[in-house]
Image (spheres, rainbow, N blue to C red):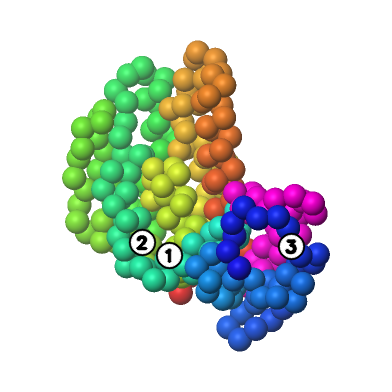
Amino acid sequence: MPVSAIKRFYKTAAVAPVDGGFEVRLDNRSLRTPAGRPLTLPTEVLAAAIAREWADQPEKGEIKPLEMAMMRLAATAIDRVAVQRHKVIDDTAKYAGSDLLCYRADAPTDLVVRQARVWQPPLDWAAGRYGARLELAAGVQHRPQPATSIAALTAAIATHSDFGLSALFNLTVAMGSVVLALAVSERHLAPLAAFEAAELDALYEIEKWGEDSEATMRLERLRRDIDSGARFLDLLGTARFL
């Protein structure tokens, strides 16, 4: 059944084993993706989390799809990633050519130092983990990255299952960094550390000039998106990989 803005029509949400994994049942009716495909999930804990999202919807009110992050990522894996897997891999890998961590300020000095302290370790990790050394650039002028490094990061992305790739792509887009997204997927970085790295410049500006309500709301949304992606990967466990 599509996840559209409709009133709650069910009383219970439960998990049941099926061939190939687990499914969520609303009043014993199998939940389907927005495209009408079976929502077969690879782990019981992910199915339970999605069932909880449905159970937590208002008993007398409209279903709120935007509040069901696990459901959205799972449906994306089935309806989008599975049918265009190579495109999603390529779209994720494109960020390796302009990864946020590679573009450094040349002033002020304290920002330069902070970027180096926070951003260089993930880059060094990617170089050691995947053999993907990325070059640094000053300012925003584009600097081409070594083809071998792009290929290595593309191969790392491709090790993810459709479900893992759904979260990895969303994390990459949210943070502007495939290196940070891979570090979260590999549990090398905690979600909070990844968020603070991705928004280092914005957080620096807040320290210097104070908070802006619009910027604060944006940061809160991004923090939730990163937390959701990381939680989805954790619920997948080893099923995040092929």
In the image, taking residue 9 as reference, residue 158 lies left or right, namely left
Q: Which residue is mark 3?
A: 9
User: Which one is earlier in the sequence, the residue at label 2 or at label 3?
Assistant: 3
Gap between marks 2 and 3 measured at Cα = 34 Å
87 up-or-down from 36: above or below: above
User: Which one is earlier in the sequence, the residue at label 1 or at label 3?
Assistant: 3
Bounds of the magenta segment? 42-68
Q: Amino acid at mark 3?
A: Phe
Q: Amino acid at mark 1?
A: Arg
Q: Which residue is mark 2?
A: 88
In the image, taking residue 70 as reference, residue 178 lies left or right, namely left
Residue 207 locus on image (x, y percent): 53, 18
Q: Nearer the viewer, mark 2 or mark 1?
A: 1
Q: Amino acid at mark 2?
A: Val
For image coordinates 42% across by 49% down, the residue present is 172
Q: Nearer the viewer, mark 2 or mark 3?
A: 3
Q: In the image, is residue 80 part of the stretch drawn in magenta?
A: no
Give me the disc on residue 80. Answer: 1
User: Which one is earlier in the sequence, the residue at label 2 or at label 1?
Assistant: 1
Residue 132 locus on image (x, y percent): 30, 55
Q: Nearer the viewer, mark 1 or mark 3?
A: 3
35 up-or-down from 129: above or below: below
Residue 14 locus on image (x, y percent): 76, 71
Camera sees residue 79:
yes
Q: Quadrant of residue 115?
A: top left
For image coordinates 54% across by 19% down, the residue present is 212
Figure quadrant of the N terminus: bottom right
Camera sees residue 131:
no
In the image, taking residue 29 as reference, residue 98 lies left or right, namely left
Q: In the image, is residue 61 part of the stretch drawn in magenta?
A: yes
Mark 2 and mark 1 residues within 8 Å of each other at the beta carbon? yes
Q: Quadrant of residue 16?
A: bottom right
